[in-house]
Image (cartoon, rainbow, N blue to C red):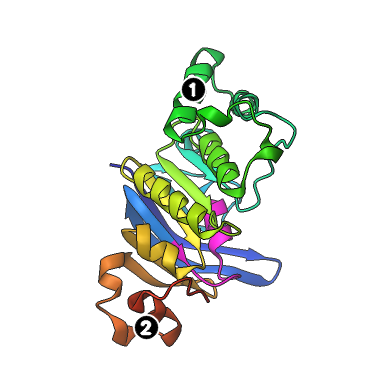
Amino acid sequence: MTEVRVTNLTKSFKKKQVLNHINFEISTGVVGLLGRNGAGKTTLMKLIATLLKQDTGEILINQIATTEVRKARALIGYLPQNFQFYRNMRVEDALIYLGLLSEIKATILTDRVEELLVKLNLTQYRNYKIKELSGGLKQRVGIAQALLNDPQVLIVDEPTVGLDPEERDNFRQLIGKLGTQRVVIFSTHIVEDIAHISDQLLILENGSLVFKGKTSDFAKRPEQLEPKYLALIRGERDANF
């Protein structure tokens, strides 16, 4: 089982505090990170992914601190919200190129790319240029690059933004399957995404963690919640805040 432990985490940019003494533990499964735009979701994910350095506090992935950057990155896969693909490269070539940039051994990389093309239903698109793919297929390629090193922690930032309803449903199912083998941290401001696939839930509001626990427990505590969170309990389609 993979575990991520965050203790007393803070982060500021200039004089603005973006994260305020965050504490939580999560384990294997899909962890929904819910919050309105500007709540601190992306900053938290970048800190876990070692792309930013915290002001105070500690992040441990299976007891390895993210300050040990090389060791931690071997455990992490990351799909940012605005992942920039090589538009004129073919899918297979782009994955091989990104794997080489990540210093994955060439003897391993070819087999790994083939495995991911099959796993993510991309084999028929392997020779398509990235610019020829739909939004949902581009996100699948993004997930493939994040899985190249077979990470124990997969971090996915707002992956369903801009997808049509069918692509969104397909992507949710994919994330759910990936969460059976690793920690998947899935950030969104769309409540329906969380309701469908997450088993653990974190809610950020103005840089503070206002809820942490099982998604199933969330609906049992309505008296502790602000009205804007009740959409999750009611199961409103595409509710967001």
Residue depicted at 63% across the width and 26% down the height: 127
Q: Position of residue 134 (x, y in %)?
A: 62, 45
Residues 21 and 230: in front is 230
Pointer 2: what residue?
Answer: 225
| Disc 2 versus disc 1: nearer the observer | 1
Residue placed furthest toward the top: 107
State which quadrant residue 203 falls in: bottom left
Label 1 CA crowd tier, 10 Å (few <14, some 14–19, many 20+):
some
Q: Position of residue 41 (x, y in %)?
A: 54, 63
The span from disc 2 to disc 1 (Cα, nearest Å) is 46 Å
Pointer 1: what residue?
Answer: 114
Label 2 CA crowd tier, 10 Å (few <14, some 14–19, many 20+):
few
Secondary structure of residue under mark 2: loop
42 sits to left or right of 221: right
The boundaries of the magenta stretch are: 33-47
State which tag comes first along the sequence, 2 or 1: 1
Q: Position of residue 86 (x, y in %)?
A: 71, 35
Which amino acid type is marked by label 2?
Answer: Leu
